[in-house]
Image (cartoon, grey):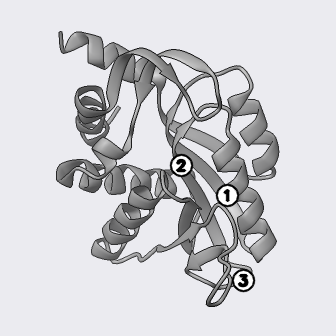
Amino acid sequence: MTAIQEQLLHLLATHSFRLGDFTLSSGVRSDYYIDCRTTTLHAQGAELTGRVFFDLLRQQGWQADAVGGLTMGADPIVVATSVISAQAGAPVHGFLVRKSEKAHGMGRRVEGFQQKGARVMIVDDVCTTGGSTIQAIEAAREFGFNIVGVACLVERLEAAGRPAVEKAALPASFVSVFTSNDVKAAHLKLK
């Protein structure tokens, strides 16, 4: 794990991880909750998130023109990655996928970067069942993007999540920066 990843994990453990009794968006009950937005929207967390995802993109050799995902979990990751890429002199543009098509204006489901055939990386903050990640994959393909990779910040390690995302992503690969076990272990060390 790089020093930047360690710093980001510390922020996730400090700001985003909670023990308790929670109902997740999938309807599943859990004894912990991870709200990555409290980290990805934190000033230092945003910078670290952008660096980690930009580094991941380069390490995987995905050569993406843009990065995007389903609003709203992906929003801060997309912006942070785009900003860091521009600062590095290797711009990777951003796009967001709406949960449904807009009923007015241009009626778009994909906002931001709009080049059909472009190589894109799909991102998400937390992957549990993979539902939001799969929605983003499907919308991006429907728009005409070529998906070269899929990544999430924290994978919750639910039995159906990874296989569902991997199947939807094919032939692209799916990677996670951290697992819920990583974040939980770092959180427990804080006590």
View extreme (bottom): residue: 105
Q: Earlier in the sequence, mark 2 or mark 1?
A: 2
CB within 8 Å, label 2 to label 1 = yes
Q: Residue at horizontal 59%, vertical 35%?
A: 25
- Give percent across and percent down for residue 104: 64, 85
Q: Residue at horizontal 65%, vertical 89%?
A: 106
Dot 3: element? loop
CB within 8 Å, label 3 to label 2 = no
Which mark is on residue 136?
A: 1
Marks 3 and 2 sit apart, C-alpha to C-alpha, by: 21 Å
Tag 2: amino acid: Asp
The residue labelled by disc 3 is: 116
Q: Residues within 10 Å of mark 3 (few under 14, many from 20)?
A: few
Q: Is residue 188 above or below residue 58?
A: above
Marks 2 and 1 sit apart, C-alpha to C-alpha, by: 9 Å
Q: Is residue 68 above or below residue 129?
A: below
Q: Earlier in the sequence, mark 3 or mark 2?
A: 3
Tag 1: amino acid: Ala
The residue labelled by disc 2 is: 124
Dot 1: element? helix
Q: Residue at horizontal 72%, vertical 83%?
A: 116
